[in-house]
Amino acid sequence: FPVTISGMDEEEKALVLKPLNKIIMRKTNEPYAIAKIAGIKLCESYNRQYGQSHGIDYRSVMPTNLYGPGDNYHPENSHVIPALIRRFHEAKQNNAPAVVVWGTGTPMREFLYVDDMASASVFVMNLEKALYERHTKPMQSHINVGFGSDVTIQELSQMISSVIGYKGSVKFDPSKLDGSPKKMMDSGCLNSLGWRPEVGLMQGLMAAYLDFCQAITINA
């Protein structure tokens, strides 16, 4: 395996580069990290074993943080964007003076709208096989799909507050963990092949909020 593996966080890299008995992972990340790598390696192994004899051509993409219509807005187990959308919406409904966001607000994260992810997946599927193989390696064949820029959690919170029309203040609780200071993918390979995202973050957040409002109306 290569010494550096793009598109994976530190725990996912550790799974590939270190013996399993020497890996220490967060319990919340371990199943997800193992599942992603197992899926990629399964596709690569099928290609290697059955590609020439049976015409197998499986391709893998590694997405950054996704958001958009159809997301999970559960108050306890949703990801950062749907969680903040719900929190700011409820604060507006209840005329709350402030919304408290966990952490310092300084970590940077990259977000990709779900329709752009679908577009990138179709784009990769439709690439000529020879072109795909020139830009990947047999046992490192995944292609990263990212937005290409990131924002701080503070900036994201302010954007969601603006989209929802919340007039109170945004506060941060530094007693809560921030997580990694920065997580952004290198999507240079996909960009060089001719694909780029079309939905900006503010546009995507507006669509996500509309979806949330429709979802809570249906479930009311």
Image (cartoon, helix red, strand yellow):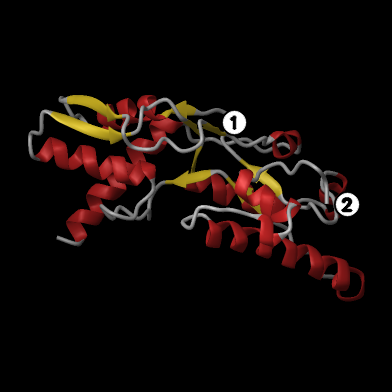
Label 1 crowd (10 A; few <14 / some 14-19 / many >=20): some
Q: Which residue is depicted at the point 84% across and 55% down?
A: 129
On residue 148, the disc is 1
Image spot of residue 194 (x, y percent): 72, 36
- Hey, what amino acid is under mark 2? Ala
Q: Which residue is depicted at the point 62% across and 43% down?
A: 10
Q: Quadrant of the C terminus?
A: bottom left
Would you say residue 74 is visible in this rendering? yes
Q: Please give left or right for residue 187 compared with residue 210 in the image.
A: right
Would you say residue 126 is visible in this rendering? no
Return the residue nearer the eye: 96 or 213.
96
- Hey, what amino acid is under mark 1? Gly
Image spot of residue 176 (x, y percent): 33, 37
Among the 4 quarters of the image, the one containing residue 187: top right
Name the mark nearer the viewer: 1 or 2: 1
Q: Please give left or right for residue 195 compared with residue 131 in the image.
A: left
- Residue assigned mark 2: 130
Image spot of residue 3 (x, y percent): 81, 43
